[in-house]
Image (cartoon, rainbow, N blue to C red):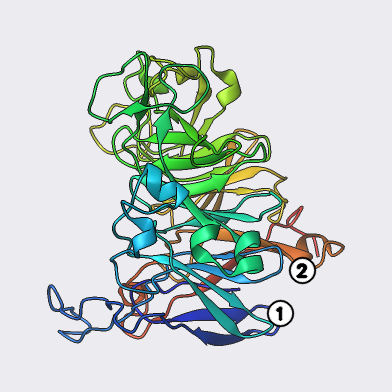
Amino acid sequence: MYGALEASADYVPVLDPTTHTASRIPLTVRDPATPATPPDMAQPSPYWGTEPIWHSKNNVHNPMLDHLGRLWLTSAVRPFDNPDFCKAGSDHPSAKLFPVARSSRHLQMYDPKTKKLTHISTCFGTHHLAFAEDANHTLWTSGGGQVVGWLNTKLFEETGDEAKAQGWTALIMDTNGNGRRDEYVEPNAPVDPTKDKRYNGAFYSVQPAPDGSVWGSVLGYPGAAVRLVPGSNPPETTLVEVYEPPFAHPDPKARTFSPRGMDVDRNGVVWAAMASGHMASFDRRKCTAPLNGPKATGQHCPEGWTLYREPVPQFKGVTADGSAEASYYTWVDWFDTLGLGANTPINTGNASEGLLALKDGKWVVLRVPYPLGYYTKWMDGRIDDPKAGWKGRGIYSTISTRTPFHMEGGKGTAPKIVRFQMRPDPLAK
C-alpha cells in the first residue's frame, strides 16, 4: 500500500499489511532546479514555532496502481515553464489546438520489481489520476486547469517518447448540436448556433467510465459533473457534456450544489459528495432534453440528479434541505471489498469522523472512535483472499489531515491507516 505526502517530504510511504512492515520509496526530480515548498512560515505554529517542516519538491498528490502493479504518481519533476513542444508554434497535435505554457505537477512511475523511477514531463498539470479500461491503458488526469490531459502508457513504454504519448484537450461543448467538434466561441461569449463553445471549468476528480467516456467534477458554485468523450482522434474529436446540479430547482428538496470528489459506478452512474450536505447520483440515462445543442450548457438535466441527505443535522437556522456534513470525496466499491455489495458508494464523512456508505438508499455509518479527529480524503479496497469471506477483504483509508499533531496525541502524532471490514453478522468468526 502506497501513500502520498504532498508538500511535506520527497518519499512515498509504504505499508505491507500482511507483514505489518513500513518502508519508504525515495523520490527524485529530473531537474534539480525544481522549486521546493516555500520555506517561510506564514505564522508561527503552536507546536513547531517558526521551524519549516515541509520541504518537498515532488509535491505528490495521488498514487495509483496499474494492471502490472506499478505505482503511478502525480508528481512535479521539473520547474513550471513548459518545453517548447507544449507551446504555441509547436506541431504537437494538442499544442496546435490549445498550447499550454506552464505546468506545476507532472507524472512519475515506480516499478517495485526493478526499483526504478521514471519521470514523465507533462505539458498539462496533474492532481488526481485514473486508468481507463482500454488497450492503451490510458492514464487520465485532473488538475490541468483549462485542459484535461492523458498519457498513452502503452505507447510511452514502447517508445519512451513522453511528448508523443501524451495529449490534452480544452473542454468544448457541442452547442451547435451537429455531433462533432468545430470552431468554438470562448466561455464568456454568448452561444453562437453555428459554433461550439468552450467550457471554462477545471477537472478536480477524474474517473473513466465503462463506456469509454471520462467524467470529472468541477468545483465552485454551482459546480458541475462533466462527461468527456475522447472520440476517434483526440483531441480533434473530443467533446464534453456539462451537467450542473439543480441549485435553483423550484422544489427546495431537489436543490444541491458544488460537487467535490466524484466516482463512477459500473453502470456509468456518477456519485459525488456535495457541499449542500448530500451524496448525489447523476444518471445521464434519465435526461429527457437533448444532450447537445444551444440549450445543453448545464441546467438541461435536473431529472438526472438524485439526492441523499447525509445522516447528520443541518446547520442551526438553515432551512434548506441538506446537512452540516462536509464530505471530501465519494468512492464506489466496484468489487464489494467492504461487504455491502458491489457498486456501493461511500462518502468520506469528514464531519462525522467516519465513512458514510449508502446501501439500498439507507446510510451505514462506520465511525472511527479512536484516535479522535479521524479525517480521510480517500479510500481503496483490497481483496487478499477471495475464499476467506469477510476476513479476506476490506477497505483502507488514511488519516489525511496535513497536521496530524492537531489530533488527539499532540506533537509527534503521525498519520495512520485505518482498515474497515464488515462482518455478515455481529457474531461471525
Asked whether residue 311 is in view, the answer is no
Position of residue 401 measured from the top left corner of the image (x, y, whole percent) = 37, 67
Q: What residue is at 63 percent from the left and 35 percent from the top?
A: 268
Q: Position of residue 285 (x, y in %)?
A: 60, 22
- Tell me if residue 147 comes above or below residue 403 in the rendering: above
Q: In the image, what residue type sits under mark 1?
A: Thr
Rendered image: mark on residue 18: 1
**Residue 153 numbered mark, or none:** none
Number of marks in the rendered image: 2
**Is residue 182 positioned above or below 127 on the image?**
above
Dot 2: few (<14), some (14–19), or many (≥20) neighbours within 10 Å? few
| Mark pair 1, 2: CA separation | 9 Å
Q: Given contact means CB atoms under 8 Å apart, are the residues at marks 1 and 2 in contact?
A: yes
Q: Residue 210, how many percent across, how many down? A: 67, 40
The answer to whether residue 113 is visible is yes
Quadrant of the frame with the N terminus:
bottom right
Determine the secondary structure under disc 1. loop
Asked if residue 44 lies left or right of residue 252, the reply is left
Residue 384 — which label?
Answer: 2
**Which residue is at a point 33% across and 79% down the rendered structure image?**
56
Q: Quadrant of residue 276?
A: top left
Task: Give the amino acid type for the residue marked by disc 2 in the picture.
Answer: Asp
